[in-house]
Amino acid sequence: MLHVAQVARVSVATVSALINGTATVSPELSQRIEQAIRDIGYKRNAIARSLKMGTTRTIGLTVPHITNPFFTDVVSVIQQAFDRAGYAVMLCCTDEDLNTQDDQIRLLLDRMVDGLIVARVGDGAILKRIVDDANVPVVLLDRVCEGVDTDTVVLDNQRAVFDAITYLIDLGHRRIGYISGSFDISPMHDRMTGYREALQAAGLPVENELIRFGNFHEVDGYNATMQLLSLHDRPSAIFSANNPMVIGTMKAIRDIGLSCPEDISVACFDDFPWSDVFQPQLTTVAQPVQAIGEQAANLLLDRLAGNRDAPPRKLALKGRLMIRNSCRPLGPPLGAIAQSVSA
Amino acid sequence: MLHVAQVARVSVATVSALINGTATVSPELSQRIEQAIRDIGYKRNAIARSLKMGTTRTIGLTVPHITNPFFTDVVSVIQQAFDRAGYAVMLCCTDEDLNTQDDQIRLLLDRMVDGLIVARVGDGAILKRIVDDANVPVVLLDRVCEGVDTDTVVLDNQRAVFDAITYLIDLGHRRIGYISGSFDISPMHDRMTGYREALQAAGLPVENELIRFGNFHEVDGYNATMQLLSLHDRPSAIFSANNPMVIGTMKAIRDIGLSCPEDISVACFDDFPWSDVFQPQLTTVAQPVQAIGEQAANLLLDRLAGNRDAPPRKLALKGRLMIRNSCRPLGPPLGAIAQSVSA
DNA sequence: TGACACGATCGAAACGTTTAGATTAGCGTT
DNA sequence: AACGCTAATCTAAACGTTTCGATCGTGTCA
């Protein structure tokens, strides 16, 4: 900028005024400056600007795993929204790990992001401290957090799973296996509650041997399913609390020589683009990813626009049960059904 | 930092020296400073540091679409690699659009990223200018670019498609539909060449009516497939040049009342996690995503570590044909085969 | 005892912006 | 002709670091 000013024979202040439109500058000088900018190929240094202005026009986004299609979609929507608003997005993956997440958030705050969208954080206390320390607006995604009073976008997880399990019960299933993610984050807790309540509402027992825990990955779903399928009295249906784990479930079913839905029904949380193209077409709980991403972005953009003092806003969205053909009604001999379907 | 210095009754220079270990500071002062840092809750301002140092420890990464599972995986690998090295990653999605990509790269350069990984850029000239202007190391991914002489990681696209098409020919297919992405990026060009050469090597004609173009999205695959299937003499197999489009292909096949592989065989570029769990299990060309991501990250990290003057390195990796059951041999009546397979 | 090296600490300039406040010139009013 | 007003421009301080060179004891050696 100094260089531009010298070439245009003006002061840096005038150059700055022209670039930012913060003051009127005469036509002659404007032209000289613009010419100099073009000649030199000058680009404003955003770092210096950030230092002076105290704002980076960058936000931080942390998700557990970008390969989970739910988060992939949400990241995509959020990225687009901030792109439109002229913000850059720094993306971090926490790998479902608390320490990693902690590090990531610190990394982002060190870089002076203007705001933070955090999906699925583990520990309320740490987050709370971080949020309080750095005076930066935070939006929590897919997670409520005790003691952290900030904008939040979540799904009504409990209700969604309640509906899905009730659907299975209505089909005639009595022993329904449930594969949960680790319990220290609220969605997993709520989903499990939905499972229990659906069983109880139908007068069915909640049996611990039917409940397994995994760490969200495919391999965890695989192992959990293997355990469920080798039970003395194995379940007739399995519900997986997230998407990567259901891949493991399907692989385990295949490896053990069973098939879905003939031998065992499967449903899971989170829809994905392929679900209605391949067989079996998985019955899923679809989250409104577009809305979730947009709402989260809007909440943060609103804070960034200056609306700092509004009370925390908590948005709860509804999931939708996408009924396909991976769950079969219990009762009639299977052969007949399969025939008539494939005809 | 000034505040810390005042509280510890030392100069800012000493605080800086202690924090960075750039000079020895006596035990007493060290202790006073550390205490002050703790008391105040001081965090070094990375922006100010970046301004002074001329380095942000941040890299820019642009991909066409993060929802394409190939790019999702690559992004994930790259993110992890840079995370380990203490770099943050700014992610941009170009939406397969040239102007968008241009804007994104400018945005990233304005923010003084230390390096850039660009996947699938469209126009060589623009990129070249940008790369030359900003004196920043660039790694090209999934794309060679005429006139831009920089580190590159690509797949041997031509060979990979050649092998896939040859596989279909060996199965007895003679009329093989091909759905390409738009032609102005090198992978699409090379893949098409692989298609043509495989046909020619087998003495088969290259028929234009069997070749369709789309813009990488599901809907494009859908439309292209609809056209192919309504041909007077429709193809017995379809190869889709990318992954999202093949979803459209499968949906079109379903909507038109056909089934795969019974009525039509399907194969595509890019593997995805679900491909061997659901039916039909899609035959795909799998890219070594892990290796691609790691190599790209390593190339850039090496430049960032100071190795600026080494000549551009071009890495070409090999794809792998994952043969599953979405392509059937032509000839014998289908019933018998399906029976024996499902038994 | 003086010269000198060395280790610890500090002062101040620099990175490239923004911006408050000072300065200047031009112009109409009285 | 003196005055004040406005618009255009400039000067210089600030943002929070890093780092070069200066300063100041202190101990060592001749």
Image (cartoon, coloured by chain):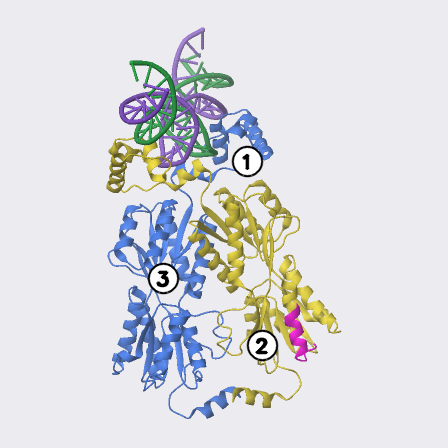
Chain colours: A blue, B yellow, C green, D purple
Q: Which residue is mark 2?
A: B253
Q: Chain of mark 2?
A: B
The span picked out in magenta is: B162-174
Q: CA distance from mark 3 to mark 1?
A: 43 Å
Label 2 residue SS: helix
The tag on residue A152 is none
The structure residue drawn at horizontal position 38% and vertical position 70%, both measured from the top left corner, is A242
Residue that label 3 marks: A96
How packed mark 2 is, by other alpha carbons closer than 10 Å (few <14, some 14-19, many 20 or more), is many
Above or below residue B327? Residue B318 is above
Circles 1 and 2: CB distance less than 8 Å? no
| Chain ID, mark 3 | A
- Considering depth in this image, is B329 or A186 the residue closer to the camera? B329
Q: CA separation, marks 1 and 2?
A: 54 Å
| Magenta-drawn stretch, dominant element (helix, strand or loop) | helix
Q: Are marks 3 and 1 on the same chain?
A: yes
Amino acid found under the numbered disc labelled 2? Ile
Residue beneath label 1, please?
A42
A199 lies above or below A39: below
Residue B220: x percent and y percent? 59, 66
